Image (cartoon, grey):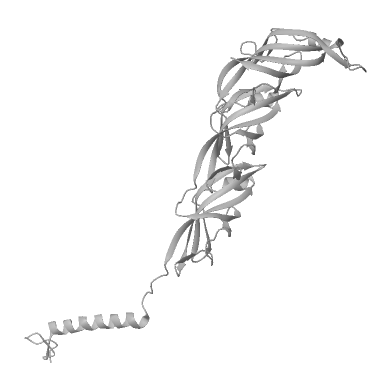
Amino acid sequence: MELIDDDGNLFGAVNVIDALVVLLVLAVVIAGAALVFSGGDAPGPDTQTTYATLDMGTQPAYIADAINEGDTYEPDGSSSATITDVHLTPRGNDIGVTLRVALEGEVNDGTLTYGNAPPRLGRTLAIETSQYQVEGQIRAVGNSNALATGERRVIIRDTLDAETASAVTPGDEIRLAGRTVATIDDVATYATNGSGQTRLLAETTLATHREDGYARFGGVRLQRGQSLTLPADDYTIEGDVERTNGDGLGETATRNVTLRMTDVREDTADSIEPGMIEGPANDPVAELTDVDTEPSLIIATGDDGSVNVADHPINRDVTITAQFQVRETATGVLFKGDRLRGGTTVTLDLETRIIEVEVVSVSR
């Protein structure tokens, strides 16, 4: 018997086209049954991503230098962390590290789980790569992949030796692990009554990190009186924040000032003369324009209640008129970084002699 006869029937009984259709339907049915009985590819678990701020505390420079955006860590097969932002600040001899990380994990009952637990505030998380291993606490959780950073201009006061103070220059950058964390915008230096010591006022722009509504630098809230360390290549400033209002060192101006010294020795009084200056001759910080010296008074009360007044044989009272170079700021008139007003005491370095004088009055 022929396999297909002249009429196109298979074995003379079934049409070939009909047979092919039956086979195709049968194949589809078998494939579907296999899928049902094998269970198929079950849908994967729901995953989600949230962002957290990690305070990594202080780290040595070689660790901070190795931490970069894009570093990843998987604590288990269902969770991963990716660093999305890095913020560094000086903290003593080490570097404060704050990270923003993307945390990906499974969602159970509407709660994301990272490393078998939700990313709660205060929880300690580790970041481990082939180069470093660190851990820190979660300080904030949110939807942004970047830290809330900004800039804040402050005035920092420090006392340095004269050579170091002269090295502080506008435009200097403070860099940590290749990142600029502060820039020196302006500098003012003044003599002190300490031998070889110079008072430094540095107008500085700081790269800050905002947390709980406050700008932070060096791991703490930025405010007046806060101690800061700024390690430049050629010097280190370890001073206090004098002002945070951002008005800079102020505009330079001059004031006429009346000063007084009482009960000073005659040789000291005689050494103070008009024309003496503090600072360079072409731009003095202070210049004495007039000096008036008279004997100090000895006032004694007799047994009968009478008052006797006599000139002191050695001590002198000195009244000085001077012109000061000052800076006008929103908080007042400053001389060498301090408020200039009656009743305060200022120190003048007159090259051959350093004197402390009381401010009697200030006028334009």
Q: Nearer the viewer, residue 210 or 292?
A: 292
Quadrant for residue 216, please give it: top right
Taking the image as shown, residue 338 lies to the left or right of residue 30, namely right
Name above or below for residue 317 compared with residue 33.
above
Taking the image as shown, residue 72 lies to the left or right of residue 337, namely left
Q: Position of residue 47 (x, y in %)?
A: 43, 65
Q: Residue at x 30, y 83 (%)?
A: 33
Q: Position of residue 27 (x, y in %)?
A: 25, 81
Q: Position of residue 107 (x, y in %)?
A: 45, 67
Name above or below for residue 345 compared with residue 221.
above
Mark yes or no: residue 234 visible: no
Q: Position of residue 341 (x, y in %)?
A: 65, 22
Taking the image as shown, residue 100 lies to the left or right of residue 225, namely left
Q: Residue at x 62, y 23 (%)?
A: 334
Name above or below for residue 215 compared with residue 323.
below
Q: Residue at x 54, y 41 (%)?
A: 208
Q: Nearer the viewer, residue 42 or 53?
A: 53
Mark yes or no: residue 300 visible: yes
The quadrant the N terminus occupies is bottom left
Taking the image as shown, residue 47 lies to the left or right of residue 321, namely left
Outermost residue toward the left?
Answer: 7
Quadrant for residue 21, please give it: bottom left
Name above or below for residue 111 compared with residue 167.
below
Quadrant for residue 332, please give it: top right
